[in-house]
Image: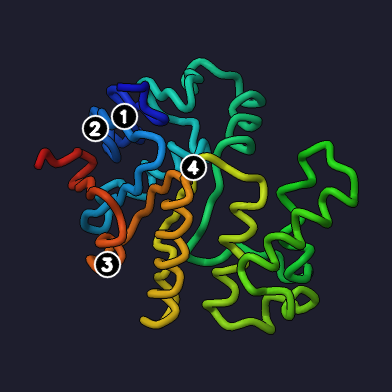
Amino acid sequence: MSSPLISLRHVEKSYPLAGGRAWVLRNIDLDIQAGEFVTLMGPSGAGKSTLLSILGMLDAEWQGEYVLDGQAVHKLKPKDRGELSRRTIGFVFQQYHLLDNLTVAENLEVPLAYRNLKKGERDALVGDMLDRFQLVGKKDLFPSQLSGGQQQLVGIARALIANPKVLLADEPTGNLHSQQAKHIMEVFQKLNQEGTTIVQVTHSDANAAYGHRIVQLADGWLQKN
């Protein structure tokens, strides 16, 4: 069997407290294969979002080993981690995190600023994403002029524009009503069928059903099935 795209060994995260430590994650071992759609579930405070932040290299304060796409993340300098993240990871957040003062098209172009692309190439990639997510008619609108579902579609398009291998989604439908949520999960399912590896955090059994397997966390520990 080929090496996992993501491999965690003995990953731990804690904070100092008077007289000891507060543990957020304990001894996490997890392998995720390329093309998987994995759901992280568990009660609030279980460590799900922290684990997602570590996978996305948003959090560097942890112990253990993390190998992503053959690269030992735990051995990389911060600059190299940043480059690996931009090359490999796309993020979708519950709060959308769109830039309010930029149009839809300009928001999509933001991740391409890190790449040595000519304007024509950037415009072509933005155009492809607008077309793919049926946002062409919205390209000159600002986020405040869009519905929640439309904002989340823009967020997904922005996460995908640099063609990441892994899409990380933290409660991606948390602010949406049920029909919008269903549409977003169908988009994820199609992306996964096309080859994108997806790791999502959700409290929703309906959302989890779109994935291949569920990883349960409780009090920072992985729960063995």
Q: Which residue is mark 2?
A: 26
Closer to us: mark 1 or mark 3?
3
Q: Which residue is mark 4?
A: 166
Label 2, label 1: how many angstroms apart (C-alpha)?
5 Å
Among numbered discs 2 and 1, the one appearing first in the sequence: 1
Tell me the SS state at disc 4: strand
On residue 12, which mark appears?
1
Kind of residue at badge 3:
Ser
Q: Which residue is mark 3?
A: 204
Label 1, label 3: how many angstroms apart (C-alpha)?
26 Å
Q: Alpha-carbon neighbours of circle 3 within 10 Å: few (<14), some, or many (≥20)?
A: few
Among numbered discs 4 and 1, the one appearing first in the sequence: 1
Residue at far top of view? 75
The answer to the question of whether label 4 and label 3 lie on touching residues, with beta carbons closer than 8 A, is no
Measured as percent of width and height from the top left, residue 36 is found at: 35, 43
Kind of residue at badge 2:
Arg
Label 4, label 1: how many angstroms apart (C-alpha)?
22 Å
213 shown above or below 59: below
Among numbered discs 4 and 3, the one appearing first in the sequence: 4
Tell me the SS state at disc 1: strand
Tell me the SS state at disc 2: strand
